[in-house]
Image (spheres, rainbow, N blue to C red):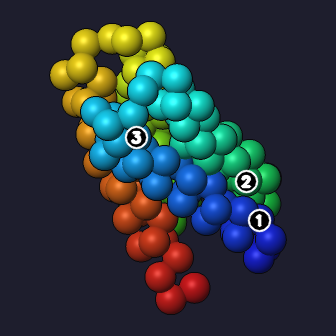
């Protein structure tokens, strides 16, 4: 990944994980309208992550190699899979959050999305450590 794409990827990760953490902390303290607007921040981060990830992936050639576990590209595939799972959980949480769903489900979904996202972040850092 060139430095510009890498920087944007880091910004996307920061918006995604920071946005999820903010929503989890402020969930009980803010009105639904403000929470609905704030929920756009992690979604924007996820979109930026997806875009910069696709741009970077184009430099690696065969996407099937991403899922050969044990290889460097396989580790990237693991990261992508963890992020996709996080996206599904966060999407559920944000959907429920903006429509007044059960509080416990929203909190659980946000917490799970945050934990999975932190796992994806760890994988990303471990892949680039020393690079």
Q: Residue at x 48, y 31 (%)?
A: 35
Task: Work out which quarter of the rendered image holds the N terminus and state it.
Answer: bottom right
Q: Residue at x 54, y 37 (%)?
A: 38
User: x%, y% of residue 74?
Assistant: 48, 55
Image quarter of residue 47: top right
Res. 15 mark: none
Q: Residues within 10 Å of mark 3 (few under 14, many from 20)?
A: many
Q: Residue at x 78, y 53 (%)?
A: 55
| 3D distance between C-alphas at marks 2 and 3 | 24 Å
Task: Work out which quarter of the rendered image holds the C terminus and state it.
Answer: bottom right
Res. 5 mark: 1
Q: Is residue 19 above or below residue 131?
A: above
| 3D distance between C-alphas at marks 3 and 1 | 27 Å
Residue annotated with mark 2:
52
Relative to 77, is 26 on the left or the right?
Answer: left
Nearest the viewer among 83 and 59 is 83
Q: Nearer the viewer, mark 2 or mark 3?
A: 3
Q: Secondary structure at mark 3?
A: helix
Nearest the viewer among 31 and 125 is 31
Q: Residues within 10 Å of mark 1 (few under 14, many from 20)?
A: some
Is any part of residue 7 visible from this angle?
yes
User: x%, y% of residue 89?
Assistant: 38, 28
């Amino acid at each position: 990944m060139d430095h510009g794409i890498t920087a944007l990827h880091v910004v996307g990760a920061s918006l995604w994980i920071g946005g999820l953490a903010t929503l989890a902390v402020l969930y009980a303290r803010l009105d639904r309208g403000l929470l609905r607007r704030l929920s756009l921040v992690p979604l924007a981060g996820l979109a930026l992550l997806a875009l910069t990830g696709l741009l970077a992936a184009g430099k690696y050639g065969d996407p099937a190699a991403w899922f050969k576990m044990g290889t460097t590209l396989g580790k990237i595939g693991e990261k992508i899979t963890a992020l996709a799972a996080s996206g599904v959980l966060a999407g559920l949480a944000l959907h429920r959050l903006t429509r007044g769903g059960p509080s416990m489900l929203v909190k659980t979904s946000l917490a799970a999305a945050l934990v999975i996202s932190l796992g994806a972040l760890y994988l990303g850092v471990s892949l680039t450590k020393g690079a």
